Amino acid sequence: MGPLTGTGVVPPVGSRAAAAWWPQRGFTLIELLVALLVAAVIIGMVAVSGTPGPDRALRFDAERLALLLSLAREEAQVRGAPIRFESDDDGYRFVVFRDRQWRPIEDDHDLRARAWGSETRLTIERADGAAALEFGRDLVEAPYRVVLVRPGARVAIVANGLGSFEVVD
């Protein structure tokens, strides 16, 4: 019986028998290159899917605005003072009617003035024809749509007049 036939004897290190007896360890260059290629493809897919397109960014802004409109509606009822939404191409803000004039809300972190991520055109379509969004003590108001438009993207916030806001494409 030789040294490789199960006698339990380990061949001397450096011999040809030792090279055949010891299992190979490590990776070949081809295996490493394939692993790197797979990792690069996965990272590329994550980077592409993680980059917000114009429609995804606009939808995010619309969902945030829908939540803020709901909050402003509730805040007007709690304060007992009307709150109005104002907007232009650069940003938007909420103002409260206090001391016989409209004043920016500065004591509420959520209803502070905000800038759009990029230039945004906003239009308000109301069933009653009013051009502004103003929340007061009324629990029921006329339904309306707020349409946000950016180059290559358009989204709307639909309000049913009872406090429900839904973002639709």
Image: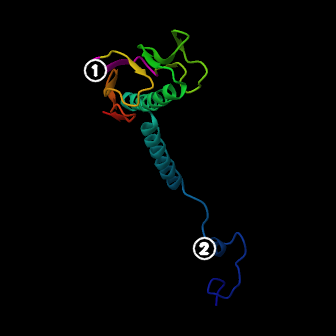
Total residue callouts = 2
Q: Is residue 159 left or right of residue 135?
A: left
Query: Which residue position holds label 1?
Result: 128
Task: Indicate yes or no whether the magenta region holds residue 114.
Answer: no
Q: Residue at x 71, y 79 (%)?
A: 10
Quarter of the C terminus within the rendering: top left
Q: Residue furthest top?
A: 101
Q: Nearer the viewer, mark 2 or mark 1?
A: 1
Considering every residue shown, the one lying at the far right of the view is 12
Residue 20's tag is 2
Q: Secondary structure at mark 2?
A: helix
Q: Amino acid at mark 2?
A: Ala
Within-10-Å neighbours for mark 1: few <14, some 14–19, many 20+? few
Q: On the image, which quarter does residue 54 sit in?
A: top left
Between the C-alphas of marks 2 and 1, the distance is: 89 Å
Tag 1: amino acid: Asp
Q: Residues within 10 Å of mark 2 (few under 14, many from 20)?
A: few
Q: Which residues are magenta?
A: 117-129
Instruction: Classify 43 as above or below 121.
Output: below
- Viewer-proximal residue among 49 and 94: 94
Q: Residue at x 43, y 42 (%)?
A: 45
State which tag comes first along the sequence, 2 or 1: 2
Residue 10 as seen in the image, left or right of residue 128 = right
Image quadrant in which the N terminus is located: bottom right
As displayed, is residue 153 above or below residue 11? above
Q: Is residue 105 left or right of residue 147?
A: right
- Circles 2 and 1, Cβ within 8 Å, touching? The answer is no
Residue 146 is situated, as x and y percent measured from the top left of the image, at 34, 24
Residue 98 lies, in percent from the top left, at 54, 13
In the rendered structure, the answer to whether residue 47 lies left or right of residue 121 reads right
Residue 89, disc: none
